[in-house]
Image: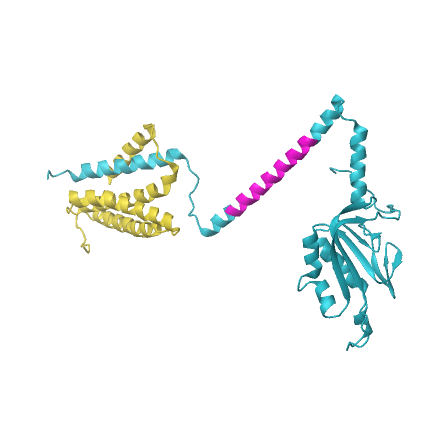
Amino acid sequence: MKKWNPKLMILVSSAIIGLFIANGMRLNLDLITPVTVKSIISAKNELSAAKLEVEDLEELIEQKSSELKTLENIASGEENIIDIIESDLKLNKAKAGYTKLEGPGIEIIMFDNLLLDNNVISYNDDIIHDVDILNIINDLKVAGAEAISINEERLTSSSEIKCGGPIIRVNGRSLGAPFTIKAIGDPKVLMAAVNAPGTYGETLKTIYGIGLEPYIVDKLIIPSYKGIFAFNYAKPMEEGD
Amino acid sequence: MVYALVGILVGAIIGFLLPYTYNTAYTLYISVAILASLDSVFGGIRANLENTFNTKIFISGFFGNAILAAFLAYIGDRLGFPLYYAAIFTFGTRLFDNFAKIRRLWLYKERPIKTKE
């Protein structure tokens, strides 16, 4: 092999290094930090959050464009604004509980423990309390109940369920046992919410011996709210403030 | 040493003038490779001053070290473990080692002190 001049070798090899260094400088990169598992996870979280935000915004776009469409229809005279507002009013009334509603759901009949010779410590364990009703109602709401009534008293957002001695008070009216709770929703899910092992309803039935008989009904009719609701203190806030 | 500096300068000028650049994804590998080959060049300078320069060793070290360092960085990337630290520590230490010896050889040119081999 031909003997190379060491100085020339060093010159050439350092030229190669210089070439790469200059190339790297031209890329103008930010400082490279080692990628750790932690940074990958945090980047992933950021990404999923951003994706969620995009989804929300896309939904908003859809909603707004449909709103715009209705407004355009109104402007072109295809739709009457009174009709739209009336249908809006209907929907809002139904939501607030001022409309009779019908649909599939379950009917629960609850009555006090009628056996007299059972070994209970207190007679309080034998009767239905406001708390029992409240818990059952809550379970039904979790299961997706859309409208609920107790003994033909519609439950609204301001309905109370209060103990009143031998009776309970709902919407300011006194109701006595037996109670009939009606709920519109997915019958199977609602049934499971009061009947499945471990639920409050099942505990009431099997441990306290309180009567709790749920039935699936294909066409339930839930009455409207009979009272008058008015705001005395609360004021609606302007949107966008 | 002067040759190395001149070489780096010449290379840098060519690099700035060349229209080609490598992919940004390879930056880590390239920088580790640069470190390894820089160490080889310093080793070459030292060997030249000690009159023990061997072309075969220099060339194989120059490219071999660079490729090995880049390969380590690549494998580490695939495994999710920073293996290139090995290259950085080894070549970084050796770089300063070589430089220290070059300084001593330069400063005591008239009466070279004994260096451990």
Number of marks present in the image shown: 0
Give the quarter of the figure containing the N terminus of chain B.
top left
Residue farthest toward the left in the current orientation of the protein: A1
Indicate the position of residue A207 as horizontal and vertical percent values.
Answer: 72, 70
Front residue of A109/A1: it is A109
Q: Quadrant of residue A206?
A: bottom right
The answer to whether residue B100 is above or below residue A178 is: above
Q: Residue at image x 61%, y 36%? A: A58
Which secondary structure type mostly characterizes the magenta part of the structure? helix
Camera sees residue A219? yes
What hue represents chain A?
cyan
Indicate the position of residue A160 as horizontal and vertical percent values.
Answer: 83, 56
Q: Residue at image x 81%, y 46%? A: A97
Q: Residue at image x 24%, y 42%? A: B63
Front residue of B15/A132: it is A132
Q: Is residue A52 magenta?
A: yes
Please give left or right for residue B5 compared with residue A216 in the image.
Answer: left
- The magenta segment: A44-66
Indicate the position of residue A134 as horizontal and vertical percent values.
Answer: 77, 59
Please give left or right for residue A227 compared with residue A110 in the image.
Answer: right
Please give left or right for residue A54 compared with residue B43 in the image.
Answer: right
What hue represents chain B?
yellow
Front residue of A141/A62: it is A141
Q: Is residue B80 magenta?
A: no
Residue farthest toward the top in the current orientation of the protein: A76
The answer to whether residue A162 is above or below residue B30 is: below
